[in-house]
Image (cartoon, rainbow, N blue to C red):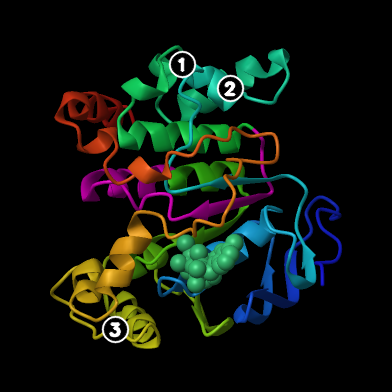
Amino acid sequence: MATELRGQLAAGAATTVRGLVRAFGERTVLDGIDLTIRPGEFVALLGRSGSGKSTLLRILAGLDNGAGGKVDVPSRNAVVFQDARLLPWSRVLDNVVLGLGRSERGRGERALEEVGLAKHARAWPSTLSGGEAQRAALARALVREPELLLLDEPFGALDALTRLRMHALLRELVARHRPSVLLVTHDVDEAIVLADRVLVLTDGRISLDARVDVPHPRRRHDGEFASLRARLLAELGVQDDSDASVNDALASDGVSEALASDGSDSEPDTDSPEPNTDSSGPNTDSSETDTHGPETDTSTSENDTDSEKQT
Ligand SMILES: Nc1ncnc2c1ncn2[C@@H]1O[C@H](COP(=O)(O)OP(=O)(O)O)[C@@H](O)[C@H]1O
Ligand SMILES: [Mg+2]
């Protein structure tokens, strides 16, 4: 079985998935997914660790051709993973424009400006904090002007404050560039704050598909936010605890262990290393280090604060 037709869409068409099935050996991970993401729509995908979120995202990104069903994805798509996957031997700007012509450097510089990293264009990736590295990864995705932006737990390894700043930055960038977005996350609050629509993946299917009718700025204790949050937590099989953060609530449940391993990248060993943005993207695998990266290193945290101020 192979997925039919990929990347054949005319500009402005929706991303569509029909009857998508993906099995690994005996285990069927995706069991008949139907999904439409309209142009400019921001969809968040929630699910327990191992539920197949990354598998779905990788199929949409064209990184896994072993699925059955029909997938139509805009040819201009880009992926950002939990770890920035910058090539350590290339300067930040070179990472951003990797695979693009030399004439695109100006666009790369503008993308770095948009994410507040203009001053770091000539820096080496190792000098960036975790938040800065993810900004660079966002710039590398944006410079390709994707119609579909695929984000796989992009903020999962960042500290809480940096994550909030990244949420604001992402909202701003999405409002300006208007790609469709599929954000994979296990953070219910993140999903509600950012998305127009939230999906829950359970047992290989979309078990819940909810529109987020919560006015901005979205605050956790607002009524509509709280009721959607409770619904999503229930669907995920997690006890709602409104006084704790969602991750605390998840940690108080049996899924904490799974989530902990998810946070350090649950992709299986059998996976081959994958490119970052598209098939021509950088291909370093720093997944081993992503939760222990420079963002937790006090020697770079100052650096981080500096760049965070620029937004
Ligand atoms: N290439 C692969 N080979 C074998 N099993 C895989 C492969 N990719 C994913 N899986 C399995 O599929 C399930 C879903 O994985 P994944 O999509 O990474 O989950 P999630 O992102 O929701 O945590 C897991 O059980 C995982 O081990
Ligand atoms: Mg995953």
Of callouts 3 and 1, the N-terminal one: 1
| Residue under label 2 | 108
The type of residue carrying mark 3 is Val
**Residue at the spot 69% in from the left edge and 34% down from the top edge:** 280
Which residue is labeled 3 in the image?
238
Q: CA distance from mark 3 to mark 1?
A: 43 Å
Disc with the residue nearer the chain's start (3 vs 2): 2
Three-letter amino acid code of the residue under disc 1 = Ala
Q: Residue at x 70, y 77 (%)?
A: 21
Q: Circle 1 sits on which residue? A: 121
| Quadrant of the image containing the C terminus | top left
Label 3 close to label 1 by CB (< 8 Å) = no
In the rendered structure, which disc, 1 or 2, sits on the residue that comes first in sequence? 2
Q: Which element carries disc 2, helix, strand or loop? A: helix
Left or right, 284 with reference to 266: right
Q: How many marks?
A: 3
Query: In the image, 200: left or right of 263?
Result: right
Q: Position of residue 182 (x, y in %)?
A: 56, 60
**Marks 1 and 2 in Cβ contact (< 8 Å):** yes
Position in image of residue 309 (x %, y %): 26, 29
Quadrant the N terminus occupies = bottom right
Residue neighbourhood size for the residue with mark 3, other residues' Cα within 10 Å, grouped as few (<14), some (14–19), many (≥20):
many
